[in-house]
């Protein structure tokens, strides 16, 4: 084998996945056809859930100072995200180019074999391994790996070569995206619906202005090159009456509202993550964030299987958990597109939804949907409110050292965590056979109110991706069953 896992695509999903695998000691080759990062800003900022993901891996400090906000929108209708108690605020105006630079340095520090100027030509799953034909600087070569993951975007070579079905709807319109210097425009951070379409304006670092322009009735074009800035400026003037032709474009792109999702995230030894598995209108900045969370869900599972710590069926939970998330993403982005990009005929719907958003329950629901904080996985039956949900922000006191820490800090190594919150020796003894892959931590939560979902909780089993797999009291299965389901047989069981 040339590597235990080959990841194709050095965008946010591929980089995050490579990092997750390396944390678990997996030998990874990361293939990228581009010679260097594009430097294009593309996706901006992180949702609250992605902020938590980066906090879990100790990555937030690498981004430097981050501007945060609890103001968001759904289809251009303002939503106050501060209603999500105990959540990180979302990050604003962090260009995707910066995110990729940070993640690439992280995976390099972890020892990932990053190979740029390597384009995948074909893939073949022979049942025992995957053969990958690659064209690189030295010509065409063949690599063999246990598992291959396509993170190579909406036009994924891996998806096509492996024969994944990718049903959905084709684009019905074209939108322009441009980063421009030399403009002095009033910010329209969540966009503005106009009689002829929609425009959005956001300031970026370095005196750059992000523009998004959608002129209603503009059919998608088959382009082999990006649109010109003159096209963007002309559309802007038709919609707003303002001349921006004097601006200096940094980069210009076009995109549509095509909506597709693969029917399966895994076919044998080939898996897909990120835009390779789902494409949609980029409403609310959810695409990159969902892609990163795909990678975090898959990484620890794939590592456990590759390292022989868990049986192969664990990989099926990747599809079971993330396909519904992708399907819901497509649903909400299509709904936002209808609200945002339709004409006056949809105004009554906008007015009704604006009224509904004033109700806290509705705002909480929409904010949870867009932020990714609503996600709930099936981890088994039980009554504890955190079962299958992310571990919330949790301040902890460690009695052994009198040192404060957080639940996110405990997840930094990318391992499972058993939080013993009631100092129960019997619990720790039952978990000890899994101590080679689960950290057993006795701690006392601080600042927990009576209405907290953690009130009265004696213990939590937290997966490496930050989701609660077992809780006491509240789970209907005992701790060893939960440990074996998510982390494989105990050391004694593997040796017997």
Image (spheres, grey):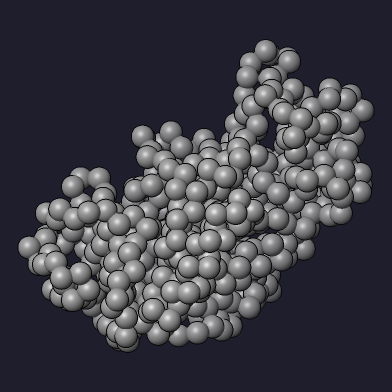
In the displayed structure, 280 sits above or below 362; it is below
Residue at 45%, 85% (x, y): give it.
170
Residue 436 coordinates in the image, percent (x, y): 75, 37
Q: How many numbered tags mark residues here?
A: 0
Q: Observer-nearest residue: 260 or 6?
A: 260
Q: Quadrant of the N terminus?
A: bottom right
Residue 407 appearing in the image:
yes
Image side of residue 45 versus residue 3, left or right: left
Residue at 53%, 43% (x, y): give it.
82
Q: Observer-nearest residue: 259 or 23?
A: 259
- Place residue 227 in its image quadrant: bottom left
Residue 252 coordinates in the image, percent (x, y): 23, 67
Q: Observer-nearest residue: 416 or 52?
A: 52
Q: Observer-nearest residue: 394 or 449?
A: 449
Residue 234 coordinates in the image, percent (x, y): 15, 75
Image side of residue 263 versus residue 116, left or right: right
- Place residue 450 in its image quadrant: top right
Residue 155 appearing in the image:
no
Image side of residue 104 versus residue 405, left or right: left
Image side of residue 63 versus residue 324, left or right: left
Residue 110 coordinates in the image, percent (x, y): 49, 41
Residue at 11%, 67% (x, y): give it.
243
């Amino acid at each position: 084998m040339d590597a235990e896992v080959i990841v194709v695509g050095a965008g946010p999903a591929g980089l995050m996945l490579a990092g997750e695998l390396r944390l678990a000691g997996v030998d990874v080759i990361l293939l990228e056809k581009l010679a260097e990062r594009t430097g294009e800003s593309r996706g901006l900022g992180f949702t609250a859930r992605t902020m938590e993901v980066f906090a879990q891996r100790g990555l937030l400090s690498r981004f430097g100072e981050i501007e945060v906000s609890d103001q968001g929108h759904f289809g251009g209708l303002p939503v106050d995200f501060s209603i999500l108690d105990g959540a990180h605020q979302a990050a604003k105006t962090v260009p995707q180019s910066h995110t990729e630079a940070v993640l690439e340095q992280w995976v390099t520090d972890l020892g990932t074999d990053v190979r740029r100027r390597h384009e995948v030509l074909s893939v073949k799953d022979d049942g025992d391994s995957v053969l990958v034909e690659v064209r690189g600087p030295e010509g065409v070569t063949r690599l063999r790996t246990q598992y291959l993951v396509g993170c190579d975007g909406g036009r994924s070579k891996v998806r096509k070569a492996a024969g994944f079905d990718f049903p959905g709807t084709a684009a019905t319109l074209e939108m322009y995206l441009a980063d421009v210097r030399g403009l002095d425009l009033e910010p329209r951070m969540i966009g503005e619906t106009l009689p002829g379409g929609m425009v959005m304006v956001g300031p970026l670092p370095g005196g750059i202005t992000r523009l998004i322009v959608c002129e209603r009735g503009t059919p998608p074009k088959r382009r082999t090159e990006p649109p010109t800035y003159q096209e963007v400026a002309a559309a802007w003037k038709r919609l707003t009456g303002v001349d921006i032709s004097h601006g200096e474009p940094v980069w210009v792109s076009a995109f549509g509202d095509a909506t597709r999702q693969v029917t399966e995230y895994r076919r044998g030894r080939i898996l897909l993550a990120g835009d390779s598995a789902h494409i949609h209108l980029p409403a609310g900045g959810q695409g990159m964030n969902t892609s990163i969370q795909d990678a975090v869900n898959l990484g620890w599972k794939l590592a456990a299987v590759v390292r022989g710590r868990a049986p192969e069926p664990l990989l099926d939970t990747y599809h079971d958990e993330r396909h519904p998330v992708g399907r819901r993403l497509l649903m909400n982005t299509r709904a936002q597109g209808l609200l945002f990009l339709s004409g006056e005929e949809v105004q009554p719907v906008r007015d009704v939804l604006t009224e509904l958003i004033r109700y806290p329950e509705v705002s909480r629901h929409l904010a949870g949907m867009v932020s990714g904080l609503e996600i709930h996985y099936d981890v088994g039956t039980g009554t504890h409110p955190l079962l299958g949900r992310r571990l919330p922000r949790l301040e902890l006191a460690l009695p052994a050292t009198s040192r404060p820490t957080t639940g996110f800090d405990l997840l930094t190594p990318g391992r499972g965590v058993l939080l013993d919150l009631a100092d129960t020796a019997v619990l720790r003894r039952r978990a000890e056979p899994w101590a080679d892959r689960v950290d057993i931590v006795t701690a006392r939560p601080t600042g927990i109110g009576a209405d907290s979902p953690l009130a009265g909780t004696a213990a939590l089993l937290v997966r490496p991706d930050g989701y609660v797999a077992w809780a006491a009291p509240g789970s209907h299965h005992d701790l060893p069953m939960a440990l074996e389901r998510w982390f494989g047989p105990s050391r004694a069981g593997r040796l017997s």
